[in-house]
Amino acid sequence: MNNVTIKMFAAVAVMLVLSACEDGPSGVHPSTELDQVRRRGAPFNDSYTVRLAGHGILSGDSIAMKSFLYDTGHVAFQSFLPATIITLENSSVDRVQLKTAGKLTAPTTINTWAVGPISIAGNGVSATMESGPYINHEGRSYFGINGTVVITHVAKDEAFVYGVEGYLNGTFQSIWPKGFVPTAQKPVPDGFSVQSPTLVGDKLTVHSLRFRTTMANGVRYVQ
């Protein structure tokens, strides 16, 4: 390898490091592309483009760093809250759901995440997000405790929203640790208070999740 080639590789490496530092934990990772070109083998031997609703990178206490994909995404307005619900799903029934205050009709940043009341019923516990995202991954629910959602684009006309784009980064936590099974001797895990329940489960870090929802009919934001 000659000196010119080495210098070129070094320059590219420096640019990548600088750009990563500039974005920091609140940026979007460049590898999380939503339009992916894939190759078909024989007898087709051609390429096609897959349009994803979400593509992210995560790791956790019991999960090695990995990428994760979502096939579909949509937006709904709940007038009785009022709130905007953005949902991403895939064929494995994994899901991301993001709740924002009011009707989302313009780019914004959402960095106030709040977990709602945690309730105990039978041998299980449940909760919802009052503001911010939660993730259901591999059958477990993780609630957003700290991070940022950046809405970069809202596609709309005079009355309807047709799509939302953005990205999120942050830390999530389950209510109970993975594998905990209540017993008569130990009905709740260590650190969990029945009188004042809080999250005491496994942590999950979303290093980058880029998302895009599209809806042909749209959802009305003007009555």
Image: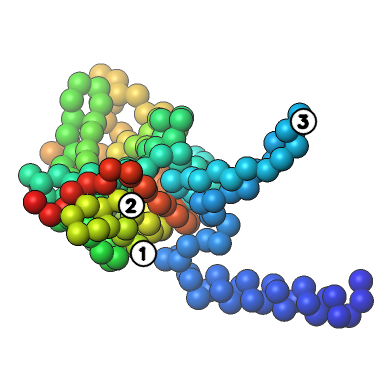
Q: Residue 14 placed where, x, y %?
A: 67, 77
Q: Amino acid at mark 3?
A: Ala
Quarter of the image holding residue 210?
bottom left
Residue 39 appears left or right of 109: right
Specify whether residue 222 is in view.
Answer: yes
Question: Could you classify mark 3 by the number of other residues whose Cα lies within 10 Å: few (under 14), some (14-19), or many (20 or more)?
Answer: few
Up/down of 28 relative to 198, above or below: below
Report the residue marked by disc 1: 152
Judging depth in this view, the residue of 41 and 180 nearest the camera is 41
As drawn, the residue found furthest toward the right would be 2
Q: Secondary structure at mark 3?
A: loop
Numbered disc in front, either 1 or 3:
3
Q: Is residue 168 left or right of residue 182?
A: right
Q: Is residue 178 visible?
A: no
Image x and y of residue 87, in percent: 32, 43
Dot 2 crowding, Cα within 10 Å, few <14, some 14–19, many 20+:
many
Q: Nearer the viewer, residue 112 or 214?
A: 214
Whole-number angstrom distance, CA of label 2 to CA of label 1: 11 Å
The numbered dot on residue 163 is 2
Give the alpha-carbon distance from disc 1 to disc 3, as whole Å.
Answer: 40 Å
Q: Is residue 61 above or below residue 14?
A: above
Residue 188 x/y as whole percent: 26, 31
Q: Tag 3 or tag 1, which sits nearer the N-term?
A: 3
Q: Amino acid at mark 1?
A: Thr
Quadrant showing the N terminus: bottom right
Measure how far apart labels 2 and 3 are at the Cα level.
36 Å
Q: Which residue is mark 3?
A: 42
Q: Which mark is residue 120?
A: none
Q: Is residue 112 above or below residue 211?
A: below
Disc nearer the start of the sequence (2/3): 3
Please name the residue shown 7% across and 44% down the image: 80
Q: Tag 1, which secondary structure?
A: strand
